[in-house]
Amino acid sequence: QGKGSKLLLQYDLYCPLMMAFSLAALLLSGMKGARAASPEAEVHRQGATLLGSALGASFSFWLGGSALQYAVMYGLKVRVRMLPLTCVTGYALGGVCAPLLGKLILAPAPTAAFLLLLCVGGGASAATAGRTLASLAQDPKQAVAIGVLCAGLNILGTMYLEWMYF
């Protein structure tokens, strides 16, 4: 019983929900900033609002990533319940929010600053979530696959959100 199993036993959805709403607020700020910087580059979607797009992206990223990880873990015959998995991936949203917040604060800074924040803040959160979920696997090869999947989704998802909404 390692540290990861303790995180999976003590779960709630309050903090992950707040992280998802924080991510939506950051995405909304990023979209408003991008719209103000270049109004001609704005993409018009019928019936889409900025708030709806931000909430949809945030919750889709969180719950879709959780569902994908659950499906992969189920395929690898790793026993996990959806609620603790969703909680762990929700806490990992902190590593998504930190670099995006840094990008908003350091707006004129080059992309290297965002990538540094992504590697430090996002990497630590992604590694913790990956280690927590990998602790459920019996086979070390499965543990590596689960950890890499979790960390990769977190890091690549953050890069996609930054590219798409900022």
Image (cartoon, rainbow, N blue to C red):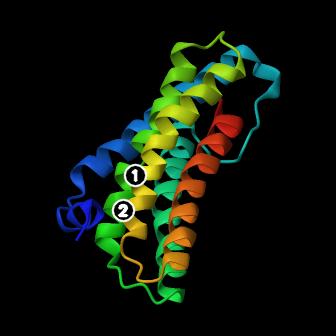
Q: Is residue 123 above or below residue 75?
A: above
Give the vertical position of 22 relative to 136 (above or below). Answer: above
Furthest residue toward right:
40
* Residue 128 numbered tag: 1
- Residue at mark 2 to residue at mark 1: CA–CA distance: 6 Å
Q: Can you tell which mark lies on residue 132? A: 2
Q: Are marks 2 and 1 in contact (CB under 8 Å)?
A: yes
Q: Residue at x 70, y 22 (%)?
A: 111
The residue closer to the viewer here, 36 or 3, is 3
Q: Residue at x 26, y 65 (%)?
A: 2
Task: For label 2, count other residues whose C-alpha is less than 10 Å away and answer few (under 14), some (14-19) or many (20+).
Answer: many
Residue in the picture at 47% in, 86% down:
74
Point out residue 59 in the picture as x, y percentages from the top left corner: 46, 54
Q: From this viewpoint, is residue 96 visible?
A: no
Judged left or right of residue 18, residue 109 is: right
- Residue nearer the viewer, 59 or 126: 126
